[in-house]
């Protein structure tokens, strides 16, 4: 089994590639839930939905969230009636939030709801939330503490960040479905090119996930989310600069430290390879910009090759 750790866009793009080259019984995608929140009475899981819509081929690539074939009657009506519109919810997207909210209210587990939804979207590979327990990312900023979506959507990542808290993470457990997988035969873990601070860090803050990785006998291969010294999308590079981490592929490698054994970095950052190799890491340089499914699949092949090399030592 290959276990991929994914946030939203970057994670979803690599998940598509891995799903194209691995059969369903060989891939599990574990998804960040630190971005989840309750809004207008709905339980919203942005990263799970991005991964689900992208694997189903229904995502909106321009926006990086939501569905491509979307209409906005709900939002327009909400606005006309004076409702809160800072977080956009499309009409089709809304159905997912309503089904999930109702299932959670009946006491169902998020991992079970996610399995049902992904199956109904025709996704054959397993998508599992990092936990069934509530974890909420809080961003520490120069304007005080902000709930993740307040920082990300309402404030458009403008405040300068000084740190993060993952509320509930220390008491959160792995979902049963993930426990069964990690207790089985894991060939490698892939850290997707997702935001290290708000997509991957919340997963590592779940004690069972962190301890599983610390005790590993398999390689961890990561793809750099920094390409050409910048983020492809989102605030990863801005956060790195604000946190005093060098916004480069080697900066990300130093940030993850011993958690990652091998790196796949972009050809635009080829000059970083030497610094990462000096950390004692295997490094592969390739095109990591996943602009279509073929490129996602090619990157997934490279990641699996590096994982194979790393396990042979
Ligand atoms: P979010 O939850 O939607 O913000 O998504 P993630 O945390 O999964 O992804 C954001 C990160 O993905 C950013 O740091 C981007 O630079 C990175 N990213 C997005 N697309 C690509 C890509 O095609 N290649 C690489 N290497 N990184 C990407
Ligand atoms: Ca996210």
Image (cartoon, grey):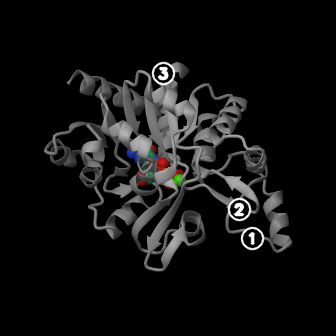
Q: Are marks 1 and 2 in contact (CB under 8 Å)?
A: yes
Across and down, in percent, residue 244 comes to 28, 67
Dot 1: what SS? loop
Q: Is residue 224 left or right of residue 291?
A: left
Q: Is residue 20 visible?
A: yes
In the rendered picture of this protein, how many numbered marks are placed on residues? 3
Q: Nearer the viewer, residue 236 or 257?
A: 257
Query: Which residue is denoted by mark 3 in the rendering?
Result: 26
Task: Kindly identify which numbered label has been placed on residue 39.
Answer: 2
* Farthest left residue in view: 278
Task: Kindly identify which numbered label has been placed on residue 52.
Answer: none
- The N terminus - image quarter: top left
Q: Is residue 106 above or below residue 306?
A: below
Across and down, in percent, residue 84 comes to 74, 70
Q: Residues within 10 Å of mark 3 (few under 14, many from 20)?
A: some
Residue in view at x 48 percent, y 27 percent: 181
Q: Give the quarter of the image for residue 299.
A: top left
- The C terminus - image quarter: top left
Q: Residues within 10 Å of mark 2 (few under 14, many from 20)?
A: few
Q: Mark 1 to mark 3: distance in Å?
A: 42 Å
Mark 3 CB near ligand 1 (8 Å cut): no
Q: Is residue 294 visible?
A: no
Q: Give the quarter of the image for residue 54.
A: top right
Across and down, in percent, residue 47 comes to 57, 48
Query: Which residue is denoted by mark 1 in the rendering?
Result: 84
């Amino acid at each position: 089994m290959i276990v991929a750790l994914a946030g939203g866009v970057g994670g979803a793009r690599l998940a598509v590639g891995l799903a194209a080259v691995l059969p369903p019984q060989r891939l599990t995608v574990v998804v960040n839930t630190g971005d989840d929140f309750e809004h207008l009475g709905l339980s919203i899981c942005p990263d799970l939905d991005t991964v689900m819509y992208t694997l189903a081929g229904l995502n909106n690539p321009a926006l990086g969230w939501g569905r491509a074939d979307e209409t906005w009657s709900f939002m327009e009506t909400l606005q006309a009636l004076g409702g809160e519109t800072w977080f956009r919810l499309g009409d089709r997207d809304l159905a997912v939030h309503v089904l999930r909210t109702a299932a959670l209210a009946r006491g169902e587990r998020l991992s079970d709801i996610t399995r049902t939804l992904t199956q109904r979207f025709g996704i054959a590979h397993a998508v599992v939330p990092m936990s069934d327990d509530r974890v909420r990312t809080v961003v520490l900023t120069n304007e005080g503490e902000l709930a993740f979506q307040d920082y990300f959507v309402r404030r458009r990542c403008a405040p300068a960040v000084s740190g993060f808290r993952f509320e509930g993470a220390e008491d959160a457990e792995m979902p049963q479905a993930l426990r069964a997988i990690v207790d089985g035969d894991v060939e490698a873990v892939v850290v997707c090119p997702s935001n290290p601070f708000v997509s991957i860090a919340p997963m590592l803050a779940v004690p069972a996930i962190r301890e599983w990785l610390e005790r590993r006998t398999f390689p961890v291969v990561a793809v750099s989310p920094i390409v050409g010294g910048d983020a492809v999308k989102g605030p990863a590079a801005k956060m790195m600069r604000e946190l005093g981490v060098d916004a480069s592929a080697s900066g990300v490698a130093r940030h993850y430290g011993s958690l990652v054994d091998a790196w796949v970095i972009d050809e635009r950052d080829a000059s970083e390879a030497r610094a990462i190799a000096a950390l004692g890491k295997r490094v592969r340089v390739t095109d990591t910009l996943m602009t279509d499914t073929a490129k996602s699949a090619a990157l997934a092949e490279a990641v699996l090759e590096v994982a194979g090399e790393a396990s042979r030592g």
